[in-house]
């Protein structure tokens, strides 16, 4: 067996939405019933091939919209634990919804990468369909096009893409046309950053569909793929479940509720 390098993975919780209507969360949910909401994350991967940032969060000026509270600039938090966002070289984008591709200008030296299916979706006929454009913002797409012309945006084209030894980027689609998930080799084995392929653990536990999707069948298939690649919910990091914040410890007291250590087994309850 080839010895794969291990990577360190951290989640930065930069925003939270304490409550949310069930109807905005699950397909067929009650629009009047409020349930526990979502947390919002950016991720840092550190390893022998350098530092990768995964997704860039929504812009601070959207704080308050939909009851989503911006807690901190992800790039400022990174700076506090020794990563200078201004010199970061690689940013991986799981998809282009507004809460994943804001703040691109905080990484002025970085090259960005996204799946070609997602780029085609946000710059083509998909956007003429109202339900498909609901979570995209024009200014983010314009910035991605700017990066393309600056030769700072590249594309994944395969279903399974190797980013570096021990980091795989899988296209699953479903939630968005080009939705990807990351499989990362860490000191506790492989873990999966599911991003919005799995917003909440309930989606994989009961195959209860999230309310926003491009392709329902692919989204549910994505739940299965995410769980299968992770090998269990203890190795699957959902993209928005506040249980991630409940289960994983902060890297230190200073970063309580802000920087979560995904390299150790979670305390699930
Ligand atoms: Zn999201």
Image (spheres, helix red, strand yellow):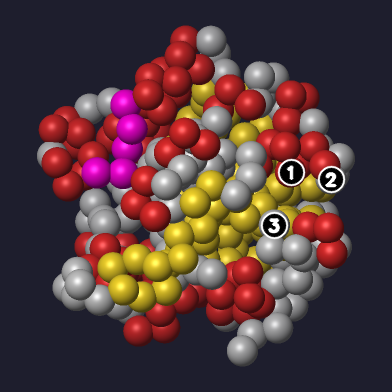
Farthest top residue in view: 149
Left or right: 256 as drawn, with respect to 35: right
Residue visible at 53% across and 10% down?
150
Indicate left or right for 259 with 192 as reference.
right
Disc 3 vs disc 1: Cβ atoms closer than 8 Å? yes
Residue at which label 2 appears: 81
Does residue 84 belong to the magenta stretch? no
Question: On the image, numbered disc 3 is attached to which residue?
Answer: 258
Contact between labelled residues 2 and 1, with CB atoms less than 8 Å apart: yes
Magenta stretch, residue numbers: 134-138
Is most of the magenta stretch helix, strand or loop? Answer: loop
Q: Up-down: is 145 above or below 28?
A: above
Instruction: Work out how far the residue at label 3 is from the one at label 2, CA to CA, in angstroms.
Output: 11 Å
Depth check, front residue: 160 or 188: 188
Label 3 Cα crowd, 10 Å radius (few <14 / some 14-19 / many 20+): many
- In the rendered image, the quadrant that contains the N terminus is bottom right
The residue to which callout 1 is attached is 77
Measured as percent of width and height from the top left, residue 218 is found at 29, 61
Disc 3 to disc 2: CB gap under 8 Å:
no
The residue at 37%/46% (across/down) is 65
Residue 170 appears left or right of 269: left
For the image, the number of numbered tags is 3
At a point 44% along the width and 53% down the height, the residue shown is 68
Q: Residue 170: x, y in percent?
A: 50, 53
């Amino acid at each position: 067996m080839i010895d794969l390098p291990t990577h360190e993975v951290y989640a930065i919780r930069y925003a939270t939405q304490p409550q949310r209507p069930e109807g905005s969360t699950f397909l067929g949910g009650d629009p009047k019933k409020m349930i526990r909401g979502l947390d919002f994350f950016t991720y840092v991967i550190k390893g022998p091939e350098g530092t990768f940032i995964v997704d860039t969060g929504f812009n601070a000026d959207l704080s308050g919209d939909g009851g989503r509270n911006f807690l901190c600039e992800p790039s400022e938090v990174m700076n506090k634990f020794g990563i200078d966002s201004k010199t970061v070289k690689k940013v991986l984008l799981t998809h282009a919804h507004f809460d994943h591709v804001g703040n691109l200008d905080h990484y002025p030296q970085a090259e960005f990468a996204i799946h070609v299916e997602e780029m085609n979706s946000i710059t083509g006929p998909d956007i003429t369909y109202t339900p498909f454009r609901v979570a995209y913002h024009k200014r983010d797409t314009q910035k991605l096009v700017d990066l393309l012309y600056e030769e700072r945006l590249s594309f994944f084209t395969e279903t399974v893409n190797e980013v570096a030894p021990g980091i795989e980027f899988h296209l699953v689609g479903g939630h968005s046309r080009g939705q990807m998930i990351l499989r990362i080799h860490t000191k506790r084995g492989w873990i999966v950053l599911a991003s919005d392929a799995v917003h909440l653990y309930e989606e994989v536990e009961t195959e209860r569909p999230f309310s926003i999707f491009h392709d329902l069948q692919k989204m549910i298939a994505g739940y299965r793929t995410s769980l299968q690649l992770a090998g269990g919910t203890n190795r699957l990091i959902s993209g928005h479940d506040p249980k991630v914040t409940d289960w994983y410890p902060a890297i230190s007291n200073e970063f309580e509720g802000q920087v979560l250590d995904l390299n150790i087994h979670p305390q699930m309850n």
